[in-house]
Image (spheres, rainbow, N blue to C red):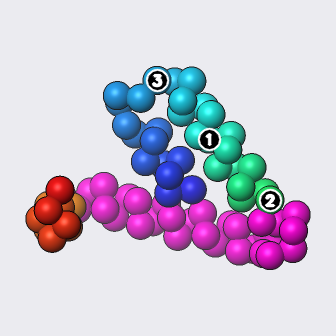
Amino acid sequence: MMFILYMSTTKNIDLKYKILIFIISVLIMLATLFVKQHVILDLISGNILALIVFLFIKYNKKIVIKTKKLLRI
């Protein structure tokens, strides 16, 4: 889910790649359900957690700057 959110906000990637990434990511999420590794509640709570973390990082530029300095990107 985090990758879907990140790719949806990136401007320099073609729409066809964004759609492909969305489809593959959703299929991965569904695959974990079908092989009985997780239940629906895990999927829902994981997506909510990913959204919260994504929004927190998106609107907190200081964290992003410090992380880039730490990783030397």
Answer yes or no: is residue 63 visible. no
Answer few, some or many: residues within 10 Å of disc 2's Cα (few below 14, many 20 plus, some between 14 and 19).
few
Asked which secondary structure carries label 1, the reply is: helix
The answer to which image quadrant residue 72 occupies is: bottom left
Q: Is residue 56 magenta?
A: yes
Q: Is residue 68 above or below residue 20?
A: below
Task: Give me the residue at 71% from left, 55% from top.
Answer: 28
The amino acid pointed to by label 3 is Asp
Q: Earlier in the sequence, mark 3 or mark 1?
A: 3
Q: CA distance from mark 2 to mark 1?
A: 14 Å
Answer yes or no: is residue 57 visible. yes
Q: CA distance from mark 3 to mark 1?
A: 13 Å
Task: Give me the residue at 40% from left, 39% from top.
Answer: 9
- Point out which mark residue 14 bears: 3
Going by the image, does 20 lie left or right of 58? right
Q: Which residues are magenta?
A: 32-61
Identity of the residue furthest to the front in this view: 72
The x and y percentages for residue 39 are 81, 74
Q: Is residue 3 above or below residue 51?
A: above
Q: Is residue 49 above or below residue 65?
A: below
The amino acid pointed to by label 2 is Ala
**Disc 2 vs disc 3: Cβ atoms closer than 8 Å?**
no
Q: Earlier in the sequence, mark 2 or mark 3?
A: 3
The x and y percentages for residue 17 are 54, 30
The amino acid pointed to by label 1 is Phe
Task: Give the residue number, with chain letter if any, for mark 2.
Answer: 31
**Disc 3 vs disc 1: Cβ atoms closer than 8 Å?**
no
The x and y percentages for residue 61 are 18, 58
Going by the image, does 39 lie left or right of 46? right
The x and y percentages for residue 34 are 88, 63
Task: Give the residue number, with chain letter if any, for mark 1.
Answer: 22
